[in-house]
């Protein structure tokens, strides 16, 4: 906690000039068997409300749709980046804006999902999720995960054969169009538009590694005076997480303690 307190000091000393950027699943909300059942604890939500009142920029960057992310967090005063960077839902907006480069791919991605929604996948308890320009295949909770992964490897081969891209995460495989979709680009855009001097990014999964790299690059280039990368430990998190971050916290409880430290006003 002493290390965390010291690491947060530059942000806490200049909240109006700082950004707080957070993943949701596995970071704010505990991972559950069915993603639809995930929720942000009320104590965490109240801390985010307090942080949003003090800090210059607060945003959630999620693999979920931006509208779903906002419904899950239930705070309209912060911004949301959805589906790893494909959608932007600014604070106060009523609808998310999809990256124009991805809009033309939505129908083709849905057609791919329809073709892959087979009885074999359903029997293996693989769940499909329509994220607009991205199709996700979840196998968390499948009775035989080896069988599920084997089936999805075949799906991945078919996707690649039609020039689509495949990304593997924590018990999820995503099929994406051959267009760059990157949490790192999303973080860079948020920070540049927000004109902040310091930023923290907190995340737990493979797609968060791009955000960590972006924060490091912005700091090294001098665009940010201070960048803090915080990884969230978990049983099935990526092996690269520790090397990509400045410090680690233990699970969503650790994130809640981090947020509590940010929410406390700096003594004058």
Image: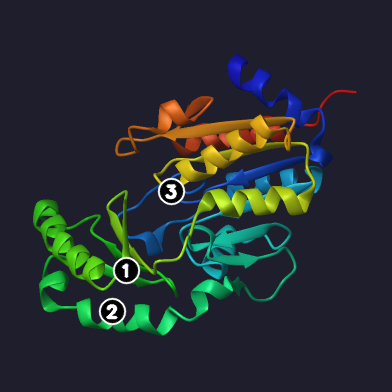
- Please rate how many residues cluster around mark 3, counting C-alpha atoms within 10 Å: few if below 14, some from 14 to 19, many from 20: many
Q: Is residue 89 above or below residue 268?
A: below
Q: How many marks?
A: 3
Q: In this figure, which residue is indicated by the disc labeled 3? A: 207
How far is disc 2 from disc 1 in space, using C-alphas?
A: 10 Å
Mark closest to the chain's N terminus, 3 or 2: 2
* Quadrant showing the C terminus: top right
* Quadrant showing the N terminus: top right
Does dot 1 land on a helix, a strand or a loop? loop
**Can you see residue 100?**
yes
Mark closest to the chain's N terminus, 2 or 1: 2
Q: Position of residue 171 (x, y in %)?
A: 27, 52
Residue 134, picture quadrant: bottom left
Q: Is residue 39 above or below residue 205?
A: below
- Asked if the residues shown at circle 3 and circle 2 are in contact, with their CB atoms under 8 angstroms apart, the answer is no
Please name whichever residue, 41 or 251, is drawn nearer the observer in this view of the structure. 251
Residue 150, picture quadrant: bottom left
Q: In this figure, which residue is indicated by the disc labeled 1? A: 164
Does dot 2 land on a helix, a strand or a loop? helix
Please name whichever residue, 73 or 248, is drawn nearer the observer in this view of the structure. 248
Residue 112, picture quadrant: bottom left
Does dot 3 land on a helix, a strand or a loop? loop
Q: Residue at x 59, y 16 (%)?
A: 3
Q: Residue at x 10, y 72 (%)?
A: 120
Outermost residue to the right = 268
Q: Position of residue 53 (x, y in %)?
A: 79, 48
- Asked if the residues shown at circle 2 and circle 1 are in contact, with their CB atoms under 8 angstroms apart, the answer is yes
Q: Position of residue 23 (x, y in %)?
A: 52, 48
Please name whichever residue, 190 or 12, is drawn nearer the observer in this view of the structure. 190
Q: In this figure, which residue is indicated by the disc labeled 2? A: 112
């Amino acid at each position: 906690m002493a290390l965390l307190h010291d690491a947060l000091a530059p942000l806490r000393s200049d909240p109006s000039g700082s950004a707080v950027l957070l993943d949701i699943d596995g970071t704010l909300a505990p991972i559950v068997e069915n993603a639809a059942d995930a929720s942000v604890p009320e104590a965490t939500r109240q801390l985010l409300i307090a942080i949003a009142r003090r800090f210059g920029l607060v945003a959630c960057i999620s693999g979920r749709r931006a509208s779903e992310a906002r419904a899950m967090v239930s705070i309209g005063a912060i911004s949301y980046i959805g589906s790893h960077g494909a959608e932007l839902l600014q604070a106060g907006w009523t609808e998310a804006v999809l990256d124009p480069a991805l809009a033309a791919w939505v129908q083709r991605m849905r057609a791919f999902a329809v073709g892959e929604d087979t009885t074999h996948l359903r029997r293996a308890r693989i769940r499909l999720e329509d994220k607009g320009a991205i199709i996700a295949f979840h196998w968390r909770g499948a009775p035989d995960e080896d069988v599920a992964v084997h089936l999805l490897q075949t799906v991945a081969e078919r996707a690649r054969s039609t020039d689509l891209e495949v990304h593997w995460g924590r018990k999820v495989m995503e099929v994406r169009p051959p267009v760059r979709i990157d949490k790192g680009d999303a973080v860079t855009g948020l920070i540049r538009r927000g004109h902040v001097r310091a930023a923290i990014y907190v995340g737990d999964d493979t797609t968060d590694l791009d955000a960590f790299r972006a924060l490091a690059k912005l700091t090294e280039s001098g665009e940010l005076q201070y960048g803090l990368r915080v990884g969230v430990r978990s049983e099935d998190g990526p092996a690269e997480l520790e090397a990509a971050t400045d410090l680690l916290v233990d699970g969503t409880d650790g994130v809640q303690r981090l947020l509590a430290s940010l929410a406390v006003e700096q003594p004058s």
